[in-house]
Image: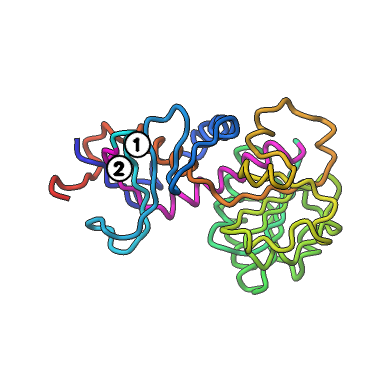
C-alpha cells in the first residue's frame, strides 16, 4: 500500500486531542520506565514504528518540515505528515497532561504570557482537563494581547482580557502558560498565587530563562525529559503520571518544563496512521515517489 500523504487539512481534521491525551499519558509512563532514543528519531516500546523530522526531499512538500513514519525495524515508509499542526497539537496536549497532573483540581483562572501562535491551541486544549472561567493575556505588544483576548472570548465563551503587565496577568491565575521566551524571563515565582502551576513549553534550554536562580526560587520544577530530570534531581512528567496522586504536593507552586521529545511525534503520527490507513479517500504518495 502506498504511503499516506497527510498535509494540514488531513492532520487538523483527524488528530483528535482527546484521543491523543490518552495515548500520550500512557506513552509518558512507558517512556519514563524505558526511554528509547537514538539519532533524533521517535521510538517507544510497544509501537512498531519510528518517526523522523525532515525538511524537503519529498514531492509536493517543497521546503516544509514533515514527519516521516516508518516501520520498525524494516524502515518501510508508512506516511509523510506535515509537522506544523501535528507538533502544535502534540505540544498543547502535553501541556494539558502537565496541568492535569500538577495543577489543583479546581484551577479555573489562567494567565497567558506571550500571544504566540501556539497560545490559543494550548489554552483550548486545557479544557480537556480543567473547567476554565477566565483568562488574562499579556504580551509586550498590547495590540497582540487584545487581539488574542478577543479571539479567545469569541471562540471559547469565557471571560478574557488583555493586561498591561505580567503581575496583573497572574494576579488570580492558578495556571500560567508561558508562550514566549520573553515571558519566561519576565515571570517571578513571587508573583504567583499559592498553589499556582506554570507551563513552560520551550524549543531549547536557552529559551527558558534563569532556571534555578532567584526568579524561580520556590517552584517545584518537573521536567519532560527523564535525563534532564535526573540531572536536576527532579521527577519527570512520566514519573509523576505513574505515581499515585499526592495531595500534599497540590499545595506547592509548580512548573513544568517541556521541550518536546521525539517519542511524542511518534505517538501523534501513529494515531493518525491508525485512523486513516484504510481510508481510500486519503491522499497517498505516487508509486514512483
Marks counted in the figure total: 2
Pointer 2 and pointer 1: residues touching (CB < 8 Å)? Answer: yes
Please, what secondary structure does the residue beneath circle 2 have? strand
With respect to residue 115, does 102 lie above or below? above
Indicate whether residue 94 is drawn in magenta: yes
**Corner quadrant of residue 189:** bottom right
Q: Is residue 157 visible?
A: yes
Bin the neighbour count of mark 1 within 10 Å (Cα to Cα): few under 14, some 14-19, many 20 and up.
many
Task: Say if the magenta span includes residue 92.
Answer: yes
Residue indicated by mark 2 = 79
- Which region is colored magenta? 75-104
Question: Residue 53's spot in the image, x, y percent?
Answer: 39, 52
253 left or right of 240? right
The residue drawn where x is 13% and y is 49% is 288
Q: Which mark is residue 273?
A: 1
Disc nearer the start of the sequence (2/1): 2
Amino acid at each position: 500500500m502506498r504511503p499516506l500523504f497527510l498535509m494540514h487539512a488531513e492532520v487538523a481534521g483527524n488528530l483528535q486531542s482527546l484521543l491523543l491525551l490518552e495515548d500520550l499519558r500512557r506513552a509518558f509512563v512507558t517512556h519514563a520506565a524505558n526511554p528509547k532514543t537514538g539519532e533524533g528519531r521517535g521510538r517507544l516500546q510497544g509501537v512498531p514504528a519510528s518517526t523522523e523530522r525532515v525538511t524537503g526531499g519529498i514531492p509536493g512538500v517543497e521546503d516544509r518540515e514533515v514527519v516521516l513514519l516508518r516501520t520498525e525495524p524494516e524502515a518501510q515508509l508508512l506516511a509523510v505528515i506535515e509537522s506544523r499542526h501535528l507538533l502544535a497539537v502534540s505540544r498543547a496536549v502535553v501541556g494539558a497532561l502537565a496541568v492535569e497532573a500538577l495543577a489543583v483540581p479546581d484551577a479555573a483562572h489562567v494567565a497567558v504570557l506571550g500571544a504566540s501562535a501556539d497560545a490559543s491551541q494550548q489554552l483550548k486544549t486545557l479544557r480537556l482537563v480543567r473547567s476554565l472561567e477566565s483568562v488574562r493575556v499579556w504580551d509586550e505588544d498590547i495590540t497582540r494581547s487584545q487581539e488574542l483576548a478577543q479571539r479567545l472570548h469569541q471562540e471559547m465563551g469565557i471571560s478574557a482580557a488583555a493586561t498591561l503587565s505580567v503581575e496583573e496577568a497572574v494576579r488570580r491565575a492558578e495556571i500560567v502558560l508561558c508562550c514566549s521566551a520573553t515571558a519566561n524571563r519576565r515571570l517571578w515565582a513571587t508573583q504567583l498565587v499559592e498553589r499556582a502551576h506554570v507551563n513552560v513549553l520551550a524549543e531549547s534550554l536557552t529559551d527558558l530563562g534563569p532556571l534555578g536562580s532567584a526568579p524561580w526560587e520556590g517552584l517545584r520544577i518537573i521536567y519532560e525529559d527523564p535525563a534532564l530530570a535526573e540531572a536536576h534531581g527532579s521527577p519527570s512528567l512520566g514519573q509523576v503520571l505513574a505515581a499515585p496522586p499526592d495531595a500534599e504536593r497540590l499545595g506547592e507552586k509548580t512548573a513544568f518544563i517541556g521541550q518536546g521529545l521525539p517519542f511524542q511525534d511518534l505517538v501523534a503520527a501513529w494515531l493518525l496512521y491508525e485512523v486513516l490507513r484504510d481510508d481510500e479517500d486519503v491522499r497517498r504518495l505516487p508509486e514512483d515517489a
